[in-house]
Image (cartoon, helix red, strand yellow):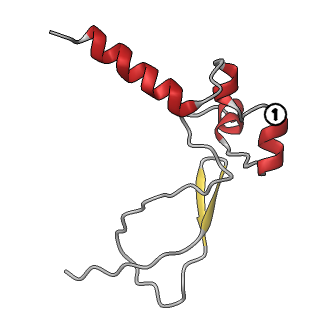
Amino acid sequence: MTLYTFTISGRIRNGKLEVELPPDAVEGQVEVQISLLEDAPPPSVTSETWELLKPEPKSGSESIALGHMGGWEDEGIVDSLQWKAEQRKKREDKNRW
């Protein structure tokens, strides 16, 4: 038995797979593997969830405008090196024998 493998595009409509086979396709039993393209959600995912999963890249200026930058200031940290040294000292004091 010889296995021939080729890739073709198709569409699923009303529960049926629609494909255009090449003219030299041999008749016989086949195994079908389906890969859904990005614009179609998998059957187990609702369309609402699928929309939430789509990435929406932002530019640097958009990220800043949305408040996604400046996490140190939000924590009251002015100097990150000083904060790290303080954290290390606290950890050393806590774990001292």
Q: Amino acid type of disc 1?
A: Leu
- On screen, residue 43 versus residue 90, left or right, reads right
Q: In this view, does 30 lie above or below 67?
A: below
Where is residue 22 shown, x and y percent of the image? 54, 85
Q: Quadrant of the C terminus?
A: top left
Where is residue 11 shown, x and y percent of the image? 64, 61
Q: In which quarter of the image is the N terminus?
A: bottom left
Where is residue 19 shown, x and y percent of the image? 59, 69
Residue at 67% across / 47% down in the picture? 14
Q: Mark 1 points at which residue?
A: 66
Name, please, the residue furthest toward the left: 97
Where is residue 12 shown, x and y percent of the image? 62, 55
Seen from the viewer's position, the closer of residues 93 and 62 is 93
Residue at 37% across / 78% down in the picture? 5
- On screen, residue 5 versus residue 82, left or right, reads left
Residue at 77% across / 49% down in the picture? 60
Seen from the viewer's position, the closer of residues 83 and 20 is 83
Marks counted in the figure total: 1
Q: Is residue 65 above or below residue 36?
A: above
Q: In this view, does 69 lie above or below 91?
A: below
Q: In this view, does 49 lie above or below 4?
A: above
Q: Dot 1 surroundings within 10 Å: few (below 14), some, or many (20 or more)?
A: few
Secondary structure beneath disc 1? loop
Seen from the viewer's position, the closer of residues 44 and 83 is 83
User: Residue 80: which quarter of the image?
Assistant: top right
Residue at 55% across / 79% down in the picture? 21
